[in-house]
Amino acid sequence: MKALIASHKENKRYLVVRGEGKYLKENIEKAILEFSGKLGMSKCGLSFIKSDKDKIIISVNREAVDLVRASIAVFHERMEVLKVSGTLKGLSR
């Protein structure tokens, strides 16, 4: 199978999300599902990259960054997006 050309690949953005509780991954998924449904969840292309105690790095489609930020903001558990970047290296700066 051939690799995709650059213009056909999804452009990803990386988000650092801070939250309380030990079920941070599940809370992020629930927030997006409750806010935008299954169609919105599939459009955002959510991937979990790295997790610490209270922070997690997620990868989403570029067009869905606003949708993910809004769904995290209105969720009943306390979560917030600390930083958004186009590269993982940009998050550490």
Image: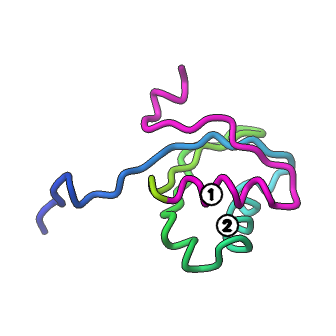
Q: Quadrant of residue 77?
A: bottom right
Residue drawn at x 46%, y 57% is 63
- x, y percentage for residue 36? 65, 73
Magenta-highlighted residues: 64-93
- x, y percentage for residue 59? 51, 50
Residue type highlighted by circle 2: Ile
Tell me if residue 68 is in the magenta stretch: yes
Q: Nearer the viewer, residue 9 or 70?
A: 70
89 lies above or below 41: above
2 lies above or below 51: below
Total marks drawn? 2
40 lies above or below 78: below
Residue drawn at x 80%, y 45% is 19
Residue drawn at x 71%, y 61% is 71
Residue type highlighted by circle 1: Val
Q: Secondary structure at mark 1?
A: helix
Q: CA distance from mark 2 to mark 1?
A: 6 Å
Residue drawn at x 47%, y 34% is 88
Residue wearing tag 2: 32
Residue wearing tag 1: 68
Q: Nearer the viewer, residue 53 or 18?
A: 18
Tell me if residue 10 is in the magenta stretch: no
Q: Is residue 8 left or right of residue 22?
A: left
Q: Secondary structure at mark 2?
A: helix
Q: Is residue 75 left or right of residue 61?
A: right
Mark 2 in CB contact with mark 1 (< 8 angstroms): yes
Q: Residue furthest left?
A: 2
- x, y percentage for residue 54? 77, 40
Q: Of callouts 2 and 1, which one flags the residue occurring earlier in the amino acid sequence? A: 2
**Crowding near the residue tagged with mark 1, few <14, some 14–19, many ≥20 C-alpha atoms within 10 Å:** many
- x, y percentage for residue 20? 85, 46
